[in-house]
């Protein structure tokens, strides 16, 4: 068995295994690759990388194209080469050959076409990327289509920024997760229409945290290539659309004959139009090659069943579509999903009315935005509506003419290839400059000692510089740091500092510039603002009692077996605590009672609202009103998360807030005693999570609490909902008047509930009550 087949077999097996076995499978894959390196030379190292046509002293761009077929994305790729070669050496990397390979070779400085048996795994991609860098030193690269993603991360790892053009709907690619690496590493993401971007953002959360671009492409020129007609006669000898039959109203569809293009829907509309308008001469024609013989056979059977032999015709593929457009009266885009097809752009620029389905294409999105063309968009996959519209246009040539003029006007405003290529080049050059800026930011951060690698930035090399680079590359992807979910994909670079808040709220920082917010913060002398906060570290002598301090601890133990560990940690402190324990059954209460002492109360509550419902109920009932400080904790396990993540997270929070290596509760209580403005203390989490899916619920809570300040985009909060607080700092939460029925029933999703919103609203309640927050940081405890 080949190395590649073994690799694939291990991957297929790993998908069915539990998390611990998946980790073993990853190790096997690594061993497999190491062995292959010893005995098999990389195929990428044996490829030819021609340089004879490279013009010296001219910069180079790499264009990655998945194939050289005569279809939309490769044709657009050819047009990119055609336009950019005026300024750059254009080097094309083709995953597969095809009909327009000679056209690429005719205009590119170099073409590397991977052989059919090229192994598409990481080791080969790393060698291929290295060879491209060594031979061409590209300014940046363009990955033309989602199918060209195979080398993006390897190019980015070599500091070659990649502009990725995503022409496809994510919804047609399964399983979800195929594009995680692409969307996490590509310097620039470009979609042709908002509907295409929304499709990917629905499946890939990172796109809701980073910036991307919406750019409709311009009209593509067609490269010359021999075309074989494989399903019907050519236009010149077609009896169906001859020059003698200009009294017929011709509706055309163009594209490869596949289900996604909706050829069956096109035929269905033809049949419906024939029934609606039997006295009018209507003709329907489809131009394009077929990809699958069985589907073509089904379509021919559909034509026979609907008796459309005189009305509908397959015309095959054409090198020159001009006569088709000249003869047609309407272009019907019947696609189920089609981002922004070149043929629809061509038709629109010619003033050919484009009838299309709502929510199925980028052209429908554009037409829907304008009064003059909105009427060409029919409800999603509503073939009856499409047929009625086509018949109405055939009967009303005045209205047809109005649509024709409106479509042409909009097309000329939206579809400009020269402008499109210029913008792509600007994005690529900006990405190059942002990568170059990283070196300067690294020097600034290192010079000012403004980075803590212990917050989870360790790299394989374990060097501080490598950790800073890892942070800067990740932060760069999130620029300009203005998305609600940006923090989901970032790590905190320095305790007591939130770079997302800094980028958003510091008036001296330009989020549209190239400098990283951490570098700007360090260079500016660490200016104070909402982006900084007090950090509590373990005291040299951490165990001491605060005289006359009354301290309550609420602990919700759905898992009562974890109470001994909690009590052990609490007892490491010299202060005394009154415990208010809640749990979800009498049996669990009996188990908790085994550890009962004089200062413990135990109460059984409904398993609804988890730890927060009983805590807020006690707060509302004045249970903690006579205490100086109250702590809120729970027996976090997170069984819905993989592996030991829940256990690790619980230990992290208890180590930071209760005790372990240090008596942290004592340290925290001393801060409360010495700083009356501190009203809330929680762990300094290295993650920068924000609202996630909870902003709308949080806004409703803020309105109910009558908070004076609007909720900001970025903020810090007690991730995991464990904290210490003055009861007075939590009083605004009482204004919510929550009852048990307000809380969702179990089982709960991992995000987007009242509980998740309450977790995030706590710091704003404290601020409304006139207090500030602080965090604890224990360097030896990591998450």
Image (spheres, grey):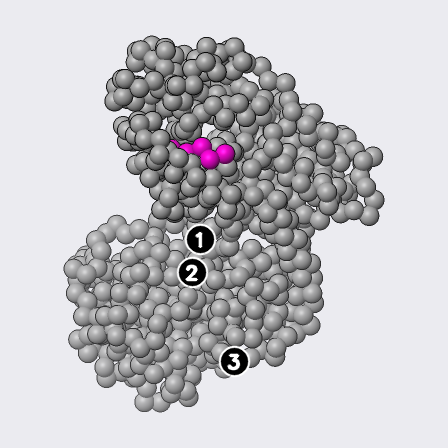
Q: What crowding class fits label 2: few (fewer than 14 Cα within 10 Å), some (14-19), or many (20 or more)? A: many
Q: Which residue is mark 3?
A: 528
Q: Give the Cα separation between the discs numbered 2 and 1.
A: 8 Å
> Could you tell whether 463 is left or right of 169 in the image?
right
The magenta stretch spans residue 356: yes
> Could you tell whether 100 is left or right of 487 in the image?
right
Reply above or below: 515 against 210: below
Where disc 2 sits, the SS reads loop
Q: Is residue 441 visible?
A: yes
The magenta stretch spans residue 123: no
> Could you tell whether 438 is left or right of 486 in the image?
right
Q: Horizontal and vertical percent for residue 373?
A: 38, 41
Q: Which residue is mark 2?
A: 484
The one of 34 and 60 positioned closer to us in this rendering? 60
| Tags 2 and 1 touching, CB below 8 Å | yes
The one of 301 and 164 positioned closer to us in this rendering? 301
Reply above or below: 92 against 624: above
Picture quadrant of residue 753? bottom left
């Amino acid at each position: 068995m080949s190395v590649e087949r073994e690799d694939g077999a291990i991957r297929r097996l790993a998908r069915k295994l539990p998390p611990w076995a998946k980790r073993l499978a990853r190790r096997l894959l690594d061993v497999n690759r190491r062995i292959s390196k010893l005995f098999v030379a990389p195929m990428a190292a044996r490829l030819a990388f021609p340089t004879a046509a490279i013009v010296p002293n001219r910069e180079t761009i790499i264009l990655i194209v998945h194939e050289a077929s005569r279809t939309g994305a490769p044709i657009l790729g050819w047009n990119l080469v055609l336009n950019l070669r005026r300024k750059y050496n254009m080097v094309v990397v083709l995953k597969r050959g095809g009909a327009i390979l000679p056209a690429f070779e005719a205009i590119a400085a170099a073409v590397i076409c991977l052989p059919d048996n090229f192994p598409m795994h990481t080791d080969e991609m790393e060698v291929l990327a290295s060879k491209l860098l060594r031979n061409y030193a590209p300014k940046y690269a363009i990955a033309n289509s989602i199918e060209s993603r195979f080398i993006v991360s390897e190019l980015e790892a070599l500091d070659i920024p990649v502009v990725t053009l995503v022409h496809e709907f994510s919804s047609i690619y399964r399983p979800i997760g195929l594009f995680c690496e692409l969307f996490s590493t590509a310097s620039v993401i470009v979609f042709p229409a908002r509907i295409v971007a929304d499709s990917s953002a629905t499946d890939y959360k990172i796109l809701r945290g980073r910036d991307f671009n919406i750019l409709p492409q311009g009209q593509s020129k067609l490269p010359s290539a021999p075309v074989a007609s494989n399903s019907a006669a050519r236009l010149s000898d077609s009896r169906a659309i001859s020059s003698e039959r200009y009294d017929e109203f011709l509706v055309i569809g163009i594209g490869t004959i596949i289900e996604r293009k909706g050829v069956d829907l096109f035929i269905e509309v033809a049949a419906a139009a024939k029934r609606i308008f039997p006295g009018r001469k209507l003709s329907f024609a489809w131009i394009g090659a077929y990809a699958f013989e069985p589907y073509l056979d089904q379509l021919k059977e559909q034509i026979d069943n609907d008796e459309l032999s005189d009305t509908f015709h397959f015309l095959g593929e054409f090198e020159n579509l001009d006569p088709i457009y000249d003869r047609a009266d309407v272009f019907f885009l019947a696609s189920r999903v089609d981002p922004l097809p070149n043929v629809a752009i061509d038709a629109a620029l010619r003033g050919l009315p484009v009838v299309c389905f709502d929510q199925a294409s980028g052209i429908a999105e554009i037409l829907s935005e304008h009064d003059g063309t909105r009427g060409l968009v029919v409800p999603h996959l509503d073939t009856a509506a499409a047929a009625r519209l086509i018949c109405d246009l055939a009967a009303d040539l005045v209205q047809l003419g109005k649509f024709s003029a409106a479509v042409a006007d909009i097309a000329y405003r939206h579809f400009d290839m020269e402008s499109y290529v210029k913008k792509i080049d600007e994005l690529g050059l900006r990405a190059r400059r942002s990568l170059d800026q990283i070196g300067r930011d690294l020097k600034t951060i290192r010079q000012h000692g403004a980075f803590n690698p212990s917050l989870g930035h360790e790299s394989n090399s374990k060097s501080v510089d490598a950790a800073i680079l890892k942070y800067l590359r990740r932060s760069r992807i999130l620029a300009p740091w203005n998305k609600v979910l940006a923090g989901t994909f970032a790590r905190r670079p320095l305790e007591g500092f939130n770079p997302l808040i800094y980028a958003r709220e510091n008036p001296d920082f330009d989020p549209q510039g190239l400098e990283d917010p951490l570098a700007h913060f360090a260079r500016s002398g660490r200016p104070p603002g909402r982006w900084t906060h007090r950090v509590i570290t373990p005291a040299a002598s951490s165990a001491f009692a605060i005289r006359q301090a009354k301290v309550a601890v609420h602990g919700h133990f759905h898992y009562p077996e974890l109470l001994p560990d909690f009590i052990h940690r609490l007892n490491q402190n010299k202060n005394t605590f009154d415990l208010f324990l809640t749990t979800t059954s009498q049996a669990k209460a009996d188990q908790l009672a085994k550890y009962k002492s004089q200062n413990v109360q135990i109460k059984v509550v409904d398993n609804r609202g988890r730890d927060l419902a009983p805590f807020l109920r006690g707060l509302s009932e004045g249970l903690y009103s006579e205490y100086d400080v109250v702590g809120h904790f729970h027996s976090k396990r997170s069984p819905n998360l993989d592996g030991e993540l829940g256990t690790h997270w619980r230990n992290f929070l208890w180590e930071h807030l209760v005790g372990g290596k240090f008596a942290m509760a004592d340290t925290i209580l001393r801060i409360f005693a010495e700083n009356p403005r501190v009203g809330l203390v929680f762990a300094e989490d290295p993650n920068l999570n924000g609202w996630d899916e909870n902003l709308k619920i949080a806004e409703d809570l803020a309105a109910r609490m009558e908070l004076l300040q609007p909720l900001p985009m970025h903020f810090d909060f007690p991730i995991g909902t464990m904290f210490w607080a003055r009861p007075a700092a939590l009083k605004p939460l009482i204004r919510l008047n929550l009852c048990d029925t307000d809380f969702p029933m179990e089982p709960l999703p991992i995000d987007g509930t009242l509980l998740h919103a309450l977790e995030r609203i706590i710091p704003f309640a404290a601020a409304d009550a006139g207090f500030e927050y602080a965090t604890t940081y224990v360097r030896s405890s990591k998450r």
